Image (tube, rainbow, N blue to C red):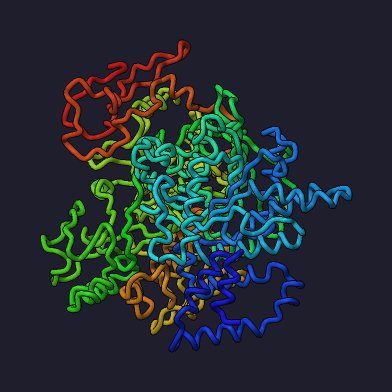
Amino acid sequence: MSLHEVGRRLGAEHSVMGRALQILTDQVEGEFRDSLDMLVRVIDAIDWRSSLAGEPGFHVHLYEHFLQEYDADLRKDSGTYYTPAPLVTEMIRLVDEVLAHTLDCPDGFADPGVSIIDPSMGTGTFLTGIIDLVARKQSEGGNEGFRAESVQELASRLIGFEKQMGAFAVAQMRVGQMLRHLNARVRLRDMRLHLADTLADPWRPSELFDRYGALWGPLRDDAEAASTIQRNERITVVIGNPPHREQAEGQGGWIEKGSPGRGAPPLDDFRLRGAAGVYENKLKSLCTYFWRWATHKVFDQHGDHRHGVVCFVSTGGFIRGAGFQGMRSYLRRTCTEGWVIDLTPETKRPPLSSRFFPGVQQELAIAIFVRRQDERRENLAPVHYTAVHGTRQYKEQQLHDLHIGGPGWHTSRPAESAPFTPGSSSGWDSFPALIDLMPWYKPGVATNRNWVISPSKATLRRRWDRLVQERNPDTKQALFKKTHGRALDKEAPQIPGHPHPPVLLGEEHGPCPSPVRIARRAFDRQWLIADGRLIDRPRSDLWRAVVEGQVFVVEQHTQRLQTGPALLFTALLPDVDYFKGNGGRALPLLHADRVPNIAPGLQNHLANSYGIQEVLPEDLLAYIAAVTAHPAFTERYADDLNSPGVRIPLTADGALWHDAIRLGRHILWASTFGTRCINPGDDRPAGTTTNWWRPIYPEIRYAREVGADVLPSTVSYDSEHEHLIIEGGIFTGVTPRMRNYTTGGRNVLDSWLAYRSDRTAGKVTSHLDRERPERWEPDWSRELVEILAVLRHLTAVEPQQEELLSRIVAAPLIDVAELTRRHILPVPERAQHARTGPDHEFLPGMETVDGQPPSPVDPLSLPNDPADTTQPKPHPPVHPSSRARRRRGPA
């Protein structure tokens, strides 16, 4: 029998495989004939009967592994990752429980009134899992006669959509195999499996098969049947694993763009109408489009049928991400109840052994949301959270033991757009947030090209010279790495304080601009070519704020923290990934005009609370550092830090305030490499002096020179002698705590050394990234000793910080309620924006209006205190001003 005839017969049941085989074998000649013959010989060599007997899903796994090996880019671009069977089994079981206990469908999926769809069915794992569950439940207790009949009844209300032909063909084969195994009297052609684009506009003709001629006519009819389902079918359950692809703008079909004459795009219901700002770009992902498709289909489309369940395993950004505030608000307002299972509490890039999907590094979660018909709710839907931990096998066991309504769930905060993480039981929510105290913030510098930063100034100059001297336009473009924000032929705004020549970069032939030192990663100072033509997002407001005495607080506010300090501090302009190599935001202590970035009125309120004349900006910063910049804080509030953003337990006790300031100055001094909070008498010498660390930590020595001819390839640690050994070089006085110091889970010394080793650090997107230092540079030896001194200082005060934190939280606190009563919170809108200079000055007499506090007040004397007859010293101003202000208090 010819392959063409095989295709014709196969097409009677397996529509896609049959049609594809007919087309492929219609006119076969040349090299393609050889390839096809080879494929036939390979497949014919497999003993299919014994293979399928031993492993019924053999052909499914064959396809999934084939796609990974044959076209890994297609798999990544399409976001195609096939769901492990244990995960599918538990998701189906949990939804079955929701149907039985919440939607009054006691038979769950077997209830005749439950219609089900997997809108991205892949190879049919969820559909076959549901068929298996229904067959098993209905045949329990020896009722084998119901097994096949229950599947026959289920067939009419079980639907699957899939866009990829290969996956669809395997799904058909898999479902057909299961029907035969169950002896169900259902033809595969009667199953409602459709090769269709779920996100396509169902009110327009399908465009999937327009170009293939009459042979694909049946598939065009099938796609139109899918559109009819989208338009008219009432669906009770949407379940599946939608594609995981991010940055999918323009691929969301009518969900993203809307349909003519049918109102706003459904995706708009996941927006906060601009309140979430640029973070809402995160909504432009295939996963989010499918979430909105499913919720629209079940909860919104039909006024007479607004009850049902949506259950997806998907990327987990919606749990706590700022860009998903609107999505969380919609789900709480629309649904009756929700359950979220965090599959990767380790956050991004979890250990391989803990992943359900080995190729997926993003955070993942299972979410189940249900709505009961006509149930009117005045309150927001409660959303319950849990997480599974450990290896994949252990996580599977935890999922198996989990039940809707059972133990292990924690209810999230009852606020529309709040994260789905648990509400606090520690008083955390009563603490003011860091951004309540320091309201202006920005992400750090985002270059979007690695080659413009290096620990070596000489390397940067070589890279620049190679770029500007390249004559081939295509090669030059590849070297530069064109992005949406910057191109060789595109003008770019100037970086404040670092102007570039008024020529396009493609026409530049001058020398490399003088590199500027920035904070690249935690405690890692590197050099940047500060040219606006090279940097996608320079954050001009932050550059303007690089003023004398500046300190930037760096907060990892988008992901949960589990280890290390909760906040970092640097005197240098921070990179956007300074905290742990994965996002964050910078909060400057000072604005560009040197006005403190502190909530209006807060300094005065604290001064009055502690009975002192004034609270200086650097004192508040020192307090924040003492309380938060140590692992004990992160461990104490680990559950609370599952929700984004650090909060500050603000003491109401003056003595504790002063203790914290004294300790915090050491944190700021060390974190800024001795450039802030300098006091030689308190072991805080100026970091600008030669060998400043020696008097404090003489045990830290550069005892043996690092091999100077090559970049290091080996690093080891001798814990017995406390030696760090780098390519033969020895650095002494390195305690185990220093060696293992991490920020956000990223080892500080390993990260620093990676940028100075013979291995390329970071993603390579240009050949200029491979232009690296040729050997160990002498400056690095001094830098490393300085980092070791900083880590020694920070780790030495950690026990004192832990003890101080315990005393602070046991004593009275200044909480959000108090700051709200005093009209300090909410922070005025004006205070949340950068001040850049004279246009932000106040009119005479308006100093206290919306943004600028009056001068501090003197402490009040208690009735029994003797009168103080001494003349008070003049208060130094909170910030420089040429205008005189009326002083308050005794003259």
The residue lying furthest to the right in this view is 142
Where's residue 489, x and y in %? Answer: 17, 64
The quadrant of the picture occupied by the C terminus is: top left
Compared to 689, does 856 lie above or below?
above
Q: Which residue is drawn at 48% across and 55% down?
A: 221
The quadrant of the picture occupied by the N terminus is: bottom right
| Front residue (pair 236, 344) | 236
Q: Is residue 296 left or right of residue 177?
A: left
Q: Which residue is drawn at 29% across and 66% down?
A: 452
Q: For residue 793, say whether it is visible.
A: no
Where's residue 688, x and y in %? Answer: 32, 58
The residue lying furthest to the left in this view is 502
| Front residue (pair 339, 510) | 339
Q: Which residue is drawn at 51% across and 34% down?
A: 302
Q: In this view, does 807 lie to the left or right of 788?
A: right
Res. 272 image quadrant: top left
